[in-house]
Amino acid sequence: MKVAVFSAKPYDKTYLSRVLSARSDPESSSFSSNSFSKVKIELVFHDFSLSTDTVALAAGASAVCVFVNDTLSENVLKALHSSGVRAILLRCAGYNNVDLPTAERLGLFVANVPSYSPEAVAEFAVALIQTLNRNTHRAYNRAREGNFNLDGLLGRTLHGKTVGIVGTGKIGVALARIMKGFGCKVLGYDLYPSDAFRECGEYVGSLENELLPVCDFVSLHCPLTESTRYMINDETLGCMKKGAMLVNTSRGGLINTKAVIKALKYHQIGGLALDVYEGEGALFYHDHSGDIIQDDDLMRLMTFPNVIVCGHQAFFTEEALTEIADCTFRNLDDFCRGVPCKNSLVIVREGHLFMKRDALPVR
Ligand code: NAD
């Protein structure tokens, strides 16, 4: 079976190939499934992303393996289906880039990797909070120039501060545990409260009235859906405690960029750290250092000393890449053997396909 792997970086090739050969090796005990399907898998790597322009390159494949900035719109899914593709394997947790209703209509198998290392993402959010708060990004540059002046580097002690976590799923809970360890008061907001979060934080019932006005740091950890798009906008930024810092390692579309630029310009918020950006599809995961970047909002953000932008790297650890590859092959294995897949985003029940609870795509 051919699997066309889109947006394949050298590290994807390394980890997918390594895990595939370990799984095919009967002597190997490092990977989870010992009832792996006997179907022989051939990986075909494409270093460009999947889109209407590149979908033809999936010809001959039965499955495609994609990442966060691949486009699986109605047109792309129909083209994939016509060329014989029957399975979409996401190497990520978020699935806002997949038109699930169309996938459902076409009867495509779609599965994600819901949890590869929530700690990896949570730890990166902490790195962003710490960098922004203690200005280590500025100190690093200054020291390299021989400038050891402390003016402008003043931070705040995290101990005793209030941290707000929006979306208390796997990553939100991992962050809550760490921030509790720092001695912070942890508040959470989620449509589906969990006991795991209650062990380290306290829930509030309203984002606008109870979380944003009291938090010194706000970290976003909910998926991008119709209802969360632009949840951080002029109005909600206005509810934030003046000078509070905002961190987004979830999906760029949660924040209205123009609104956050205004909030930074007028000192409504005291800092912003982004691992994700609403226009990232055109830029992230590629080297544009010799280009004139055309995204004026991103360029404006970069001019603020209290803004940090990273290129969607919170997941990027050795452990997470290994688990992503292993889980991707477990999902493919379920598809090949025709057994229920716990990571399927389109569920077959009584002969019909249903989408999972909050799997509404953003168009
Ligand atoms: P999760 O599904 O375990 O948790 C998401 C939580 O958000 C759930 O508890 C859900 O109830 C909640 N939620 C949904 N809608 C909400 C709303 N309107 N308001 C408040 N809460 C809401 O997911 P997770 O594994 O914790 O991942 C969270 C997100 O992180 C993913 O959706 C993905 O977009 C992003 N992510 C980013 C990276 C990265 O490298 N930057 C890596 C992995 C995941």
Image (spheres, helix red, strand yellow):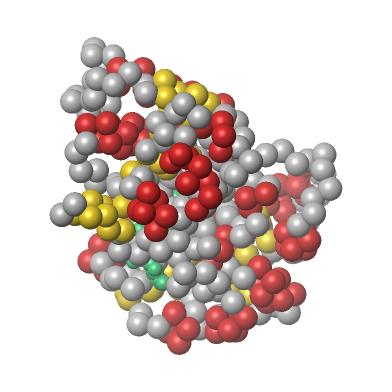
Percent of width and height locating residue 48:
61, 35
* Residue ID at (84%, 48%): 292
Report the residue that reaches farthest toward the left: 350
Viewer-closest of 137 and 172: 172
Report the residue that reaches farthest toward the bottom: 209
* Residue ID at (74%, 63%): 297
* Quarter of the figure that contains the N terminus: top left
Viewer-closest of 321 and 349: 349
**Ligand 1 lies in which image quarter?**
bottom left
Percent of width and height locating residue 175:
40, 58
* Residue ID at (71%, 38%): 287
Q: Give the number of marks.
A: 0
Above or below for 43 versus 115: above
In the image, taking residue 279 as reference, residue 229 lies left or right, namely left
Percent of width and height locating residue 218:
50, 69
Report the residue that reaches farthest toward the front: 82
Above or below for 344 versus 216: above
Above or below for 189 versus 310: below
Percent of width and height locating residue 200:
30, 65
